[in-house]
Image (cartoon, coloured by chain):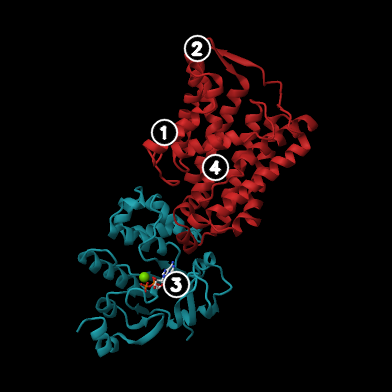
Chain colours: A cyan, B red
Amino acid sequence: MTALLELRDIDVGYGDVQVLRGLSLEVHPGEIVTLLGSNGAGKTTALRAVCGLRPLLKGEIFFEGQPLSAVPGHRRAALGLSLVPEGRELWSQLSVRENLELGAFRSRARAAANLEKVFVLFPRLRERAAQLAGSLSGGEQQMCAIGRSMMSEPKLLMLDEPSLGLSPLLVEQMFKIVSDLHAAGMTILLVEQNLTKALQLARRGYVIETGAVKLKGSSAELLANPAIRSAYLGL
Amino acid sequence: MRFVELLVAAVLLAGLYAMMAYGLGLIYGVLRIVNLAHGGMIMAGAYLGLALHDRLGMDPLLSLPLIAVVSWSFGWLLYRFVVRHLPRGATGGAQSLLLLFGVWLVMRNAVYLIFTGNDQAIRTAWSTHAWKLAGVSLPVNRVIVFGLAMLALGGLHFLLTRTYVGKAIRAVAQNPDSCTRAGIDVEKVYALTFGLGSALAGVAGLLGATIFSFNPSFGSVELLKSFVVVVMGGLGSVAGTASAALVLALVEVFAILVLPSYLTGAVGFVLLVLVLVLRPGGLFGQKVLG
Ligand SMILES: Nc1ncnc2c1ncn2[C@@H]1O[C@H](COP(=O)(O)OP(=O)(O)O)[C@@H](O)[C@H]1O
Ligand SMILES: [Mg+2]
């Protein structure tokens, strides 16, 4: 079976600083996979490269077997690829409704139907539809960012630290949302620093360190790995 | 009566100021580029209107749509082939500033060669008439210019707040990466916006030319006044721009009563300095195309 997303041996950098060094990973249809690593390991950079926001110095990214190097960033959403970025990155001075509508920029014909689906998923957003996105609470902003991604009818949803900056209660809620989306059939690539929670949710995971995969395996294997237990879980 | 007449004059003038300033603010708000060629576009609009009027006998009201299209295209091309390749933001600002200033100088000299440096004016059948309303004289050309400027700003406001393209423009101003992720071609939006700002400048130049006489340096004072309005009114808010333009026009017009005429031109800049010192965020806040 071809992978939905495949990163094959990619190098990415900022100026003279190389951040990703031969990173490879795969996500198959229907899977929920987690990408783990400490702060600065290169997780966000990898997702930005998938979105076409950072150029590759080497390697190739494939989506449904199609190489993405010839596809500019703004055409990738239409292929079925969507990222909920670290820190939400909403258009803070547009209303919640406008944020969602623009998420459907490439699927405008079905925007109204998709908006309704998002409002069913997140009733809070319906209540806040006319408010500026910047005035929402952290949890609501995260919902708005996920909703915006859902508006583009993605085949693969990538989430970059969706629990960042949320209270413990909201973190639980966020993992529940991700789990529900997956149960409803969404393929998910989840980036997290919260290893325990992410590995409870995902079936497989990759641990990256200084821009390359250090460990990979099923969640059970990773949770049992002594290196991980000492380095990331403090056990 | 004198007071009412000055008040009316200020309001009518404010329409033109708002239009000139909005083009500058829009480009800065979306691209983070100070378009120093703005003054050149204002001047070009005036001379294009003059040529169409004197050579082809076209009324400025007829040449307006044509000049809007021509200056839009000029802005679009300038972005696609020149501005796009320059660095932006905090470190790259100087390059685009110098380049666009250069574009302005080239335009100005070209116009100087074609039309000489003499003062020109576009005189139409309606440029010397005035309506009387309750004893107050309303110069027809100024009323028309005001009406058209309001129409242009109203249309722009509608575009920015009610259409997908307009919302995309505002979104690009706030977070371009999120736009790319959502499938919006940010480069296209930049080119479109540069075109819009240029079209506003060109049309404002044409409208100004039906009121004032002009020569190749037309546009310099207008550019500075646009700065004053943008700084006071914030970026890209139509209401903020209109209010700031009104403040500037009121101060200028009423300064005539108390200042010698050679000083009235400086009032706008005194106002700018006062605003920068007292309210660095602008009089009406600093929302970016909110
Ligand atoms: N815009 C940038 N310019 C320069 N260096 C950056 C930039 N963004 C990230 N980096 C560097 O790249 C490395 C990886 O960052 P990032 O991908 O954000 O890691 P993670 O998401 O795993 O925390 C870090 O060392 C960071 O300092
Ligand atoms: Mg990160």
Which quadrant would residue B178 be assigned to in this image?
bottom left
How many neighbours does mark 4 have within 10 angstroms: few (below 14), some (14-19), or many (20 or more)? many
Q: Nearer the viewer, mark 3 or mark 2?
A: 2
Residue behind mark 4 = B24
Q: Quadrant of ligand 1?
A: bottom left
Left or right, residue B227 beside residue A179: right
- As shown in the figure, which amino acid type bears the numbered disc 3? Lys
Chain of the residue displaying label 1: B
Q: Position of residue A190 (x, y in %)?
A: 35, 74
Chain of the residue displaying label 4: B
Q: Nearer the viewer, mark 1 or mark 4?
A: 1
C-alpha separation, residue under disc 3 versus residue under disc 2: 69 Å
- Is residue B148 at all visible to an observer of this figure? yes
Residue behind mark 2 = B2
Q: Is residue A216 above or below residue A182?
A: below
Q: Nearer the viewer, mark 2 or mark 1?
A: 1
- Looking at marks 2 and 1 on the same chain, the residue that comes earlier in the sequence is marked by 2
Residue behind mark 1 = B274
